[in-house]
Amino acid sequence: PTPPCTHMGVSEVAKLNVSAEQANATTAQFQDLHRQIEAEKEEARHWAVEAARLRASATAQLEETSASAVAESQDVHRQVGTEKEEARHLAVEAAKLSASATAQLEETSASAVAEFQDVRRQVNVEKEEARDLVVEVAKLNASAEQANATTAQFQDLHRQIEAEKEEACHWAVEAARLSASATAQLEETSASAAMEFQDVHRQVGTEKEEARHLAVEAAKLSASAMAQLEEASASAVAEFQDVRRQVNVEKEEARDLVVEVGKVKARARVRFEEVSTSAVVQFQDMRWQADAEKEEVCHSAAEVAESIASTTTQLREMRKQLLASCSLLYCVNYKAHLYRTLDGHNPHDDTISCQTDYLPLPAGFELAPDDGDSIDVIAAHTWGTVWLVVASGNAYGTHKWDGRAARLEDKCHLLRQGDKYKPDGRSLGVLLRSSV
């Protein structure tokens, strides 16, 4: 049968209940303080994260602004390069047009000069032919003069024959016949020479007219060629001047663009410096603010650490008091002795646990001896475990072990480390005893 257990008086139990309530209140205060400390830590972490986020945001904004300014400057630089390239291309095109116009002008001039020289050579040839015709006409005129001289000689001979007619009658008839025949031949020769001279004269006049016509045509062609040459030269000069004016206008526009790009660069540089200065100032302000907040957080952390240290000291004292109260609260009074476990379990705890840490003996308690009273106290209550070890190292079953006293296998189940003790296995505890 289970031996009767005599418990403490009502007043002592009431005092223990009050102590337990105070311990519970102290534990609640400690938990509230712990929650407050955790909340302050969480707030400090939040402010640290916020400061890091602000610093990262400022850095990202500064980098983004710098990248934007650099990209804008690069775009302007590329645009200026493109416009300069276009200006160079236009200058090359103008030079090509100028060279082409000059080549066409030179080609046209050379062609006109060559054509004029051909016409001039043709006119010279025709003039040479006209001179040859004049020489032939002069030769014909000489032949006519020779014929006239012959006629004069014949007339002299006729007069001589007429003077000597009286001397030779028979020569008179013959002379008359010869005279008639000579006169007929002379007339025929004169007529033929006159007709040939007229034909030659007419031919020379025709050739002279043709030469004049050719000279007029050559003059017209020369005038037309000169007019075309002058017109082509004027057109080429006008086109070259237009191209030159266009190139000058484009050069002026390119200079204006370069000036505008310089202004844009200056504005971009000023804007970049303003943004950089503003970002640096803002970053410094944020850094100072973050440093101030960090200082405040560090100060708060120091205060919290001091508060935690103070609270820990108070909690140690309260724990000692609580353990002292618990040592009395969780004790069983049996035959003028108080019995409890080393880890302070409630004797009516129906759970199964195990002491895993080395613990010192509470003040006023010793290891329970291996006797009948200890075995009876162990078997009468559950003690929150299955086996309890006594001073000899033997372990006996609690009320959880089928409600009867039983001994665990024959070996020492008590471990010692200095002045601290613990059991050597699971579902084990250590029983202590104190005199009332």
Image (tube, rainbow, N blue to C red):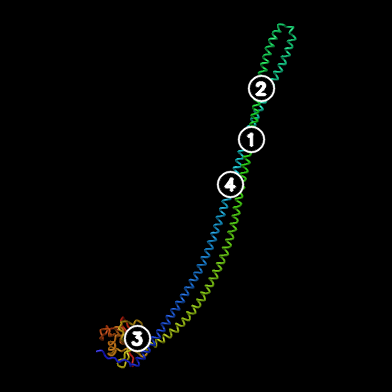
How far, Cα to Cα, is label 3 from label 4? 111 Å
Please tell me whether mark 2 sits on a helix, a strand or a loop: helix
Q: Please rate how many residues cluster around mark 1, counting C-alpha atoms within 10 Å: few if below 14, some from 14 to 19, many from 20.
A: few
How far, Cα to Cα, is label 1 from label 2? 32 Å
How far, Cα to Cα, is label 2 from label 4? 62 Å
Amino acid of disc 4: Leu
Please tell me whether mark 1 or mark 3 is closer to you in this view.
1
Please tell me whether mark 1 sits on a helix, a strand or a loop: helix
Numbered tag placed on residue 220 in the rendering: 1
Q: Quadrant of the N terminus?
A: bottom left
Please tell me whether mark 4 sits on a helix, a strand or a loop: helix
How far, Cα to Cα, is label 3 from label 2? 173 Å
Give left or right: position of 46 versus 433: right
Q: Please rate how many residues cluster around mark 2, counting C-alpha atoms within 10 Å: few if below 14, some from 14 to 19, many from 20.
A: few
Amino acid of disc 3: Gly
Please tell me whether mark 3 or mark 4 is closer to you in this view.
4
Residue under label 2, please give it. 198
**Front one among 55 and 375:** 55
Please tell me whether mark 3 sits on a helix, a strand or a loop: loop
Q: Please rate how many residues cluster around mark 3, counting C-alpha atoms within 10 Å: few if below 14, some from 14 to 19, many from 20.
A: many
Numbered tag placed on residue 97 in the rendering: 4
**Front one among 210 and 55:** 210
**Front one among 92 and 192:** 192
The location of residue 403, given as percent across then percent down, is 26, 85
Residue 10 placement: quadrant: bottom left
Residue under label 3, please give it. 344
Amino acid of disc 1: Lys
- Check whether the beta carbons of the residues at disc 4 and disc 1 lie within 8 A of each other: no
Q: Quadrant of the C terminus?
A: bottom left
